[in-house]
Image (cartoon, rainbow, N blue to C red):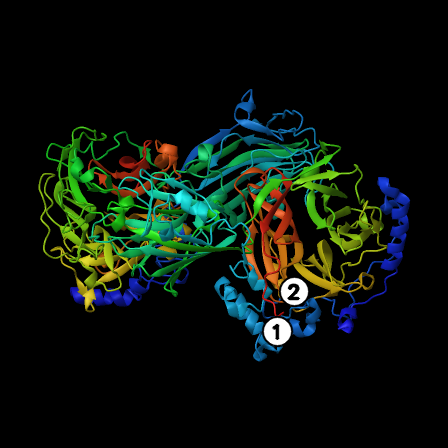
């Protein structure tokens, strides 16, 4: 495998160990006050940059391959064992022996990636990519769950609803003209013909990122004719119940119809025979907006609901009862299990970023471009570009960054940087802070260069030459995104071809001194290729999260930007998710978002980006819950 | 040719049954009809009906947004007003103040002097210009000084017209351009989007360069409405069929609240480059989204129906208009009502009945609130129709009326034909199975109708539909001598219906058979209409007009993009050959900008508590005194301040050049 990684070696005249040694000296000289000399101005002129070895695998990736058509070849043509997002987790280990071959692997991935439903099925657990956007690999909420695991209302007979739920470690607020009743039938909501009755139970839930499984048993009304008004149900609502409960998604027992209705959007989406008091109903709600109904363990169907409208969902037990409580429809028992899933569209805390210096906003910096965020274990830093220079700030709080001084961290100094530097990409390898960036030469061609620094304070020293320069029919590289993992560097970069088309390409190396080898015959180029003036793909951001690669990138359609996501286990076979971060219809990102840079955190993914409001692009931040250790494991 | 042979021939010619209607993209060039047919699609670059007239060259398309040429000016700026700030925002607003120069060049006032030149500067229209139904933007550009600039490269001095959603620009940056045409100092003309070149041309120095941008709505491959542009510069076509933006991305506030649009700007940088008079216009053909509000909002109370059966709900109106013997205009209105609210439906069975009201008005006049002759109690159905205590177990619901007015040449009422859905179940525990009943004559409001023992059409006749709802009749000839097409919603399951079907009915109100079952066609399928109908369709309200050269069929219907969010949509079909109507209905094509009325529309929200109202029904009828003027009755349900809900019937009108 070392051979494969070394195929693209070329003569480089700088060595990282030497630079690290220089950095150590510089760092010591800078002392703790952080007023060190700008390394960029002290570094020598770079030699000729590295370029793709025409004899190696780092050349052009051949014709744009479909996501999968190139897969079989790609699996054979790349050191795939090393390219797995989690080298300890080879999907082939989970697949049957039929899938040992490259073809079997590709076929399995192809079948799993065909749809979210397929990917979310248990037999696709081999692919960590299938944890994203499927409602699979969710992490059970065991600490302070928003709803109690068990609400046995029958055992609370004679109590108040509040008393009952408090006894179960939860809370409830009743509503309606009459107080709900707890008796041996369970919770009788006690609504009337003119107003619903019932109770809001537990805490707010985010059904856009949480999966909920609700098991419920109803007590059917006694002596209910064809027109009696007897109902009892459970549902999630987006608003406080008023006279009416707007059941966005839930189950409602209709006594007169002897049916259990699946309510979606406050309308009956389907109905099922109510069965008896012992009939067990299960409603499984996934953050992707699918509601699955089971009756005594047998699936009755899967339906769509608007999970995005239920980011602040209330759980209600509700209904109407005109009969005496002893004969009324009631909710006997509810069991709830909730878990957190990776829904790539469920961003929260979208907010504009502020950048201050000495407590004051730095003019124009909040409108900087190409942000990149990194966590060195002590602090988070965000690099960004302003007027062809790169600044590095430190995060004070989510969305709040500060500069230690007004000097840029990197300015153009080299001949290959005549038109400026941009697209910063901060990477922490455990010891040093690396700043990859685009260096624009006098012809407007971009190369990928890197500078390196000790973490505190960051003082970057440039390499002597770019590490990736355009060659052949590649006229420019820009917008690098780099991941360092277990001694392997992975790079995704936008590539501009001589014909004007652009595409994203992936590279890898175990030694930055030796240059980059291209991941060939995979699906990335095809997925991201653009050859139209009305569209654009740029700003890739690669992370490894929950044993899978997540590649965010910005796509322009007309004037609007949005962030798309593709996921992969091995950088070859990609599962495109489409838009995951777009216009918010309000504020700084009302029209769109671009320049994403994601960061993997325990149980969460953070992102910095540029929000589009039609006037300017402003830096912003967001994050979302995303289990980080829930992919199927063989251990 | 005998009728049966004609039917066979029509089927052979038609080729595909409506039951298996092809996807729109796969429709053959002749639209499935040989000669004398319809230019089905007015922007597909095909001669659909093979009459040698393509798209907009075919008179079939003259009223369509894709082809309409009649213009109504919406903005006309000659740059001569003393103070331009009343109508224009000087951008960037965050920069220092600047004032353009306005020289007269060859007798025309131009706008120039975008100085200082450290930033692009623009005059951005305060008001949005409605363009979503089609429109034009035109201006004249001019460069008088090419110093330092060549004809083939952009330079730092330029001026042009910009279409944008933005309300400002950032200092140093151009306006975000959905589309811009810019003349550079050296004579280069660039068409851009997102500041990326789309097309270019070269113009002479110191000569006027006329620019016209024509905008047309259409549907993309996914039936999403988009706006396309055609750009002409100096009389030469520079760009055609270019997608500017999705209609959903346009401005929907201010002057564009009803018809989305864009702001327009004259933008430039530096001196020696100018923007001349700027004009915009919108299409002046039939605009299905534009309604004239009428004053007389109706309720169950104003129609003098007894509360015993309408206390909780009135909706689903049916409307007919005719002239009466004294040349007044007579209006017949039938509604469904209930003494229990429809919100209880998921809990229990609610019963409904129909009531009839009639009023006469002067020509051109609106109806009044207090002069309706009313049936008082239900014309069809039980009183009360609903009860929650088991005391009316044998009641059966009557719902969703539709009225077809059959008129003589003087537009006097010859017959009213009433169709409605009637509940058919025999076992009280198995409710909600409906069939269709057609009744003629209907009589006046006080004439009760007894239900025939069997429905005109029952689900037993159409096994794939478990229930038949929302009937509406289309005559197959001007006198309906050959009968009707009966439209109805085919309910296939518990959720919202997704298909509207049609069955042929004879003049004698009997179902015409074909191949062992009712002669039936599928008319509208939700999944083929676009996202606005993704969650279901119902309540078709057809209107057919027979003209000398063919017929035009418009079908308004309710559609929901998400459950519960009902909106009014429109589809339309035309054909030259009305003789085929006995056997086939032409395929209705959805209007490019659907829905035409939604719960977000000002018309619907106005006067509602928290501006939240639900559309529950729509009726449409041509006025008896002016068939080109259509009267709509929009039923909406609104929240009451003290809780509970009530209903209103909102009269609206609309003029169509072709009735």
- State left or right for residue B323 relative to residue A610: left
- Looking at the rendered image, the quarter that the N terminus of chain A falls into is bottom right
- State left or right for residue B544 relative to residue B30: left
Protein chain holding label 2: A
- The front one of B101 and B388 is B388
Protein chain holding label 1: A
- Residue A559 visible in the current orientation: no
Task: Give the farthest residue toward the top.
Answer: B82
The tag on residue A571 is 2
Number of dots carrying numbers: 2
- Looking at the rendered image, the quarter that the C terminus of chain A falls into is bottom right
Q: Secondary structure at mark 1?
A: helix
Q: Secondary structure at mark 2?
A: loop
Tell me if mark 2 has few (under 14), some (14-19) or many (20+) residues whose alpha carbon lies within 10 angstroms of its own: many
- The front one of B89 and A286 is A286
Task: Give residue A607's position: percent from left, percent from top.
Answer: 63, 48
- The CA span between labels 2 and 1 is 15 Å
Tell me if mark 1 has few (under 14), some (14-19) or many (20+) residues whose alpha carbon lies within 10 angstroms of its own: some
Task: Give residue B295's position: percent from left, percent from top.
Answer: 27, 29
Task: Give residue A55's position: percent from left, percent from top.
Answer: 78, 71
């Amino acid at each position: 495998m070392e051979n494969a990684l070394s195929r693209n070696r070329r003569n480089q005249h700088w060595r990282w160990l030497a630079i690290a040694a220089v950095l150590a000296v510089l760092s010591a000289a800078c002392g703790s006050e952080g007023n060190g000399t700008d390394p960029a101005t002290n570094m020598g002129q770079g030699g000729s940059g590295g370029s793709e070895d025409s004899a190696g695998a780092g050349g052009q990736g051949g014709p744009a391959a479909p996501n999968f058509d190139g897969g079989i070849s790609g699996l054979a043509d790349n050191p795939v064992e090393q390219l797995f997002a989690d080298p300890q987790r080879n999907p082939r280990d989970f697949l049957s022996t039929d899938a040992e071959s490259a073809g079997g692997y590709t076929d399995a991935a192809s079948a799993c990636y065909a749809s979210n439903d397929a990917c979310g099925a248990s037999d696709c657990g081999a692919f960590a990519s299938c944890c994203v956007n499927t409602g699979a690999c969710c992490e059970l909420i065991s600490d302070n769950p928003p709803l109690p695991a068990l609400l046995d209302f029958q055992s609370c007979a004679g109590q108040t609803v509040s008393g009952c739920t408090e006894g179960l470690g939860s809370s409830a607020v009743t509503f309606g003209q009459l107080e709900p009743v707890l008796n041996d039938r369970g919770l009788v909501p006690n609504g009337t013909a003119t107003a619903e009755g019932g109770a809001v139970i537990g805490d707010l839930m985010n059904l856009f990122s949480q999966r909920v499984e609700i098991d419920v048993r109803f007590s059917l009304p006694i002596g209910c004719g064809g027109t009696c008004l007897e109902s009892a149900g459970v549902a999630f609502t987006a608003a406080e119940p008023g006279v009416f409960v707007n059941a966005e998604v839930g189950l409602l027992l209709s006594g007169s119809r002897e049916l259990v209705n699946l309510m979606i959007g406050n309308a009956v989406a389907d109905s099922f025979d109510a069965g008896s008091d012992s009939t067990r109903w299960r409603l499984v709600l996934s953050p992707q907006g699918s509601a699955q109904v089971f009756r005594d363990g047998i699936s009755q169907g899967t339906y769509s609901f608007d999970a995005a409208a239920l980011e602040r969902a209330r759980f209600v037990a509700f209904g109407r009862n005109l009969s005496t409580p002893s004969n009324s429809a009631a909710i006997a028992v509810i069991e709830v299990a909730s878990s957190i899933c990776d829904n790539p569209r469920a961003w929260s805390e979208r907010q504009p970023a502020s950048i201050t210096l000495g407590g004051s906003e730095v003019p124009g910096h909040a409108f900087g471009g190409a942000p990149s965020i990194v966590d060195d274990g002590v602090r988070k830093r965000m690099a960004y570009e302003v007027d062809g220079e790169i600044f590095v700030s430190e995060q004070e709080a989510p969305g709040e960054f500060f500069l230690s001084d007004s000097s840029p961290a990197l300015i153009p100094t080299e001949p290959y940087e005549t038109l400026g530097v941009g697209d910063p990409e901060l990477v922490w390898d455990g010891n040093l802070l690396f700043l990859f960036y685009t260096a624009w030469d006098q012809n407007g061609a971009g190369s990928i260069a890197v500078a390196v620094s000790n973490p505190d304070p960051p003082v970057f020293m440039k390499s002597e030459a770019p590490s990736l320069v355009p060659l052949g029919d590649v006229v420019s590289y820009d917008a690098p995104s780099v991941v360092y993992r277990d001694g392997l560097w992975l790079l995704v970069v936008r590539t501009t071809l001589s014909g004007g088309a652009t595409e994203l390409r992936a590279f890898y190396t175990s030694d930055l001194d030796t240059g980059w080898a291209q991941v060939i015959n995979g699906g990335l180029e095809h997925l991201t290729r653009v050859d139209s003036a009305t569209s654009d793909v740029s700003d890739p951001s690669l992370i490894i999260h929950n044993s899978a690669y997540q590649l965010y990138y910005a796509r322009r359609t007309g004037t609007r930007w949005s962030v798309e996501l593709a996921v992969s286990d091995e950088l070859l076979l990609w599962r495109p998710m489409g838009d995951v971060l777009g216009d918010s219809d309000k504020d700084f990102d009302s029209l769109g978002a671009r320049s994403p840079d994601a960061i993997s955190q325990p149980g969460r993914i953070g992102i910095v980006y540029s929000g589009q409001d039609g006037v300017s692009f402003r830096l912003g931040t967001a994050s979302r819950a995303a289990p980080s250790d829930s992919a199927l494991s063989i251990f | 040719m005998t009728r049966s042979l004609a039917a066979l021939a029509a089927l052979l010619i038609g080729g595909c049954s409506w039951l298996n209607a092809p996807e729109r993209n796969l429709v053959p060039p002749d639209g499935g009809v040989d000669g004398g047919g319809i230019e089905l699609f007015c922007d597909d670059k095909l001669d659909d009906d093979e009459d040698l007239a393509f798209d907009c060259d075919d008179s079939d398309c003259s009223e369509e947004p894709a082809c309409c040429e009649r213009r109504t000016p919406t903005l006309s700026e000659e740059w001569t007003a003393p103070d331009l700030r009343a109508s224009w925002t000087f951008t960037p607003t965050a920069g220092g103040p600047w004032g353009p120069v306005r020289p007269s060049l060859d007798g025309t006032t131009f706008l120039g002097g975008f100085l200082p030149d450290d930033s692009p500067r623009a005059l951005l229209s305060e008001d949005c210009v409605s363009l979503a139904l089609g429109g034009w933007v035109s201006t004249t550009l001019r460069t008088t000084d090419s110093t330092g600039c060549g004809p083939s490269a952009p330079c730092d001095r330029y001026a042009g017209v910009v279409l944008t959603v933005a309300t400002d620009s950032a200092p140093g940056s151009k306006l975000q351009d959905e589309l811009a045409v810019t003349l550079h100092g050296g004579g280069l003309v660039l068409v851009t989007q997102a500041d990326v070149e789309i097309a270019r041309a070269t113009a002479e120095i110191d000569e006027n360069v006329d620019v016209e941008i024509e905008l047309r709505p259409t549907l993309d491959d996914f039936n999403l409405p988009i706006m396309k542009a055609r750009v002409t510069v100096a009389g030469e076509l520079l760009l055609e069929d270019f997608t500017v933006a999705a209609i959903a991305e346009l401005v929907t506030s201010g002057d564009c609240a009803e018809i989305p649009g864009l702001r327009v700007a004259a933008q430039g940088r530096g001196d020696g480059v100018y923007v001349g008079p700027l004009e915009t216009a919108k299409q002046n053909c039939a605009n299905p989204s534009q309604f004239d509000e009428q004053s007389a909002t109706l309720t169950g109370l104003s129609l003098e129906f007894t509360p015993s059966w309408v206390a909780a709900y009135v909706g689903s109106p049916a409307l007919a208009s005719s002239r009466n013997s004294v040349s007044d205009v007579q209006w017949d209105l039938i509604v469904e009502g209930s003494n229990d609210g429809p919100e209880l439906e998921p809990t229990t069975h609610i019963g409904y009945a129909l009531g009839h009201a009639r009023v006469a008005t002067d020509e051109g006049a609106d109806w009044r609130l207090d002069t309706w002759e009313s049936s008082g109690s239900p014309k069809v159905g039980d009183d009360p129709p609903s009860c929650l205590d088991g005391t009316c177990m044998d009641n059966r619901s009557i719902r969703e009326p539709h009225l077809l007015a059959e008129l003589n040449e003087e537009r006097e009422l010859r017959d009213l034909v009433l169709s409605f859905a009637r509940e058919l179940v025999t076992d009280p525990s198995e409710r909600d199975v409906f069939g269709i009943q057609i009744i003629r004559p209907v009589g006046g409001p006080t004439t009760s109708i007894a239900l025939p023992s069997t429905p005109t059409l029952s689900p037993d006749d159409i096994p794939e539909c478990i229930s038949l709802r929302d009937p509406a009749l289309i005559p197959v000839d001007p006198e309906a001598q050959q009968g009707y097409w009966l439209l109805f919603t085919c309910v296939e399951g518990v959720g919202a219906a997704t298909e509207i079907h049609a069955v042929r009915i004879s003049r004698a109100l009997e179902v015409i058979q074909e191949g062992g079952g009712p002669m039936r066609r599928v008319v509208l399928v939700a999944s083929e209409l676009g996202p606005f109908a993704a969650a279901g369709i119902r309540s078709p309200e057809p209107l057919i007009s027979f003209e000398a050269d063919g017929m035009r069929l418009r079908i308004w219907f309710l559609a929901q993009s998400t459950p519960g969010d009902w909106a009014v949509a429109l589809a339309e079909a035309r054909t030259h050959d009305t003789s085929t109507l006995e056997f086939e209905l032409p395929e209705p094509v959805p209007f490019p900008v659907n829905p035409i009325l939604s719960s977000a529309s000002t018309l619907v929200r106005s006067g509602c508590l928290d501006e939240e109202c639900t559309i529950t029904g729509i009726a449409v009828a041509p006025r008896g005194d002016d068939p080109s003027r259509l009267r709509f009755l929009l039923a909406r349900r609104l929240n009451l301040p003290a809780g509970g809900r009530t209903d209103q019937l909102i009269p609206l009108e609309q003029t169509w050049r072709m009735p």
